[in-house]
Image (cartoon, grey):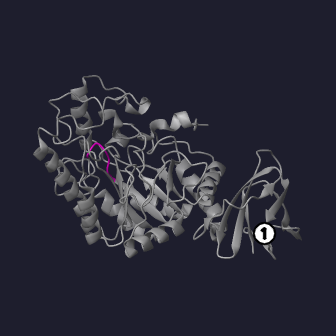
Amino acid sequence: MADFTPDALEAAGALKPAPDPGYTYPTDPAVAQTLQRWQDMKFGVIIHWGIYSFIGQAGSWSLHREDLGDFTDKAAGFEGTDGQYQTWYYDQARNFKGQEFDANQWAQAAADAGAKYLIFTTKHHDGFAMYDSAFSNLKCTAEDAGLGRDIFAEVVQAAREVGLETGVYFSKADWSRPDYWDRANPISDRFHNYDISVAPRRWDRFVQFSHDQIRELLSKYGKQMMLWLDAGWVRGPEEPFKIEELAAMARELQPGILMVDREVHGPHENYRTPEQEIPDQGPAWPWESCVTLTKSWCSMSRDDETKPTAQVIEDLLKVISRGGNYLLGIGPDATGHMSVHIRESLSQIGKWVGAHAVGIYGTRRADDIKVRADNARVYCTRKENRLFVFVVPQERPGRKEIKLWVPGRYTSAQMLDGGPIQFEVGDGGAEIEVNTDHICGLQLS
């Protein structure tokens, strides 16, 4: 079994958050409406795929020289200087063919899992566009690119065919651009490596280039639910991104679109995105935990192992019971192949979610309800006048008798999967008994 401890999952590359001025609720009615609809969805997936997948990396972090762990090491087998590595890395676009990638398979697997929206990495920090950009030849549709096809177009079409909303992941950093990284200067970290105050027009060119790419993403690929901007270190005053202008453009092109300027905080972070973690106490504002299904954001081998299904389901319950959405990270391997473990895991998750859907979608947090339980952990959600209680038996083999006491006034209770339940109205609450060896849910009204 793979190691899924927090230390093993640090390859997320997350940056510590910026100073927090507090959450700003959207004032645009269309955005507020989209935000509420997004909160009803509860569960999405994010797919990472790019050159880094082809060379067996967990992202494009090997291009920079910060030592943040194994995921920043150069690709195995490469011998040469840092400068040579940059050239070698981008040359791999010729060999990155993705011959086994089937967007329909990935979209269907996400839908089968019970996800309601799909976010795709149109461009990671390396700057390689996984869509047909008119502003760069470093793209999947370039004449010398091994892929030779518009991957994002395929993903969007496949997602729509199975009823998934789509969103654009876009990194504000671009390590391929000389207006961000000047390769004549040393590259030591993730940040720009020249003096913007000395060359302001150079930085302006970079920002304009980025805005142009986002404009085409929001113009060519139909309706998008969210613009999910990564690289939270690209922010003023050190790296001003003209985010106000960008937001205005995005909303002109896509009225009601959610802006997620990750980790920057402020009016253009419509929901916050803790990475590889689930807050012990759910924040009061809209939020989404981004958590990988495997050890990395993309597959490192053809047979990448996944977390146990019960762990993923319990993570989902933790998140929604605390008021958040759950974004599950998956991704193809070098060829575009889907690990059999990923496929089976998503199917198993979906079977459970489907049987308990009424207590998941469209619900709100109920962590104020203090349920007493013997031999189990408990998570609650609510919808209108109904309370949903999810029971996670403690890790012991065999079917278990679990007794619950739920405070409040209720006249009925039933298991969401149709199983047997004993229900009795007590003093100030309901006494319930279930027998189960797996995660289950019940509805009280």
Residue 444, located in which quarter of the rendered image? bottom right
| Residue 361 as seen in the image, left or right of residue 443 | left
Q: Residue at x 26, y 70 (%)?
A: 253
Identify the amino acid type marked 1. Gly
In this view, the residue in front, 126 or 229, is 229
- Magenta stretch: dominant SS? loop
Q: Is residue 133 visible?
A: no
Membership of 358 in magenta stretch? no
Image coords of residue 224 (percent x, y): 35, 67
Horizontal and vertical percent position of residue 24: 42, 61
Q: Quadrant of residue 300?
A: top left
Under tag 1, what secondary structure?
Answer: loop
Looking at the rendering, in which quadrant would you find the C terminus? Answer: bottom right
Q: Examine the structure image and report whether residue 123 is included in the region drawn in magenta.
A: yes
Q: Residue furthest top?
A: 80
Instruction: Report the residue at 60% width, 69% height from top.
Output: 363
Give me the residue at 58% from left, 69% from top.
Answer: 361
Looking at this view, is 269 or 187 the one in front?
269
| Residue at 25 percent of width and 44 percent of height | 239
Q: Position of residue 170 (x, y in %)?
A: 32, 53
Residue 33 in percent (x, y) is at 44, 74
Residue 402 visible to the viewer: yes
Residue 380 horizontal side relative to residue 254, left or right:
right
Residue in front for this viewpoint, 188 or 312: 188
Residue beneath disc 1? 408
Q: Which residues are magenta?
A: 122-127
254 over 75 or under it: above or below: below
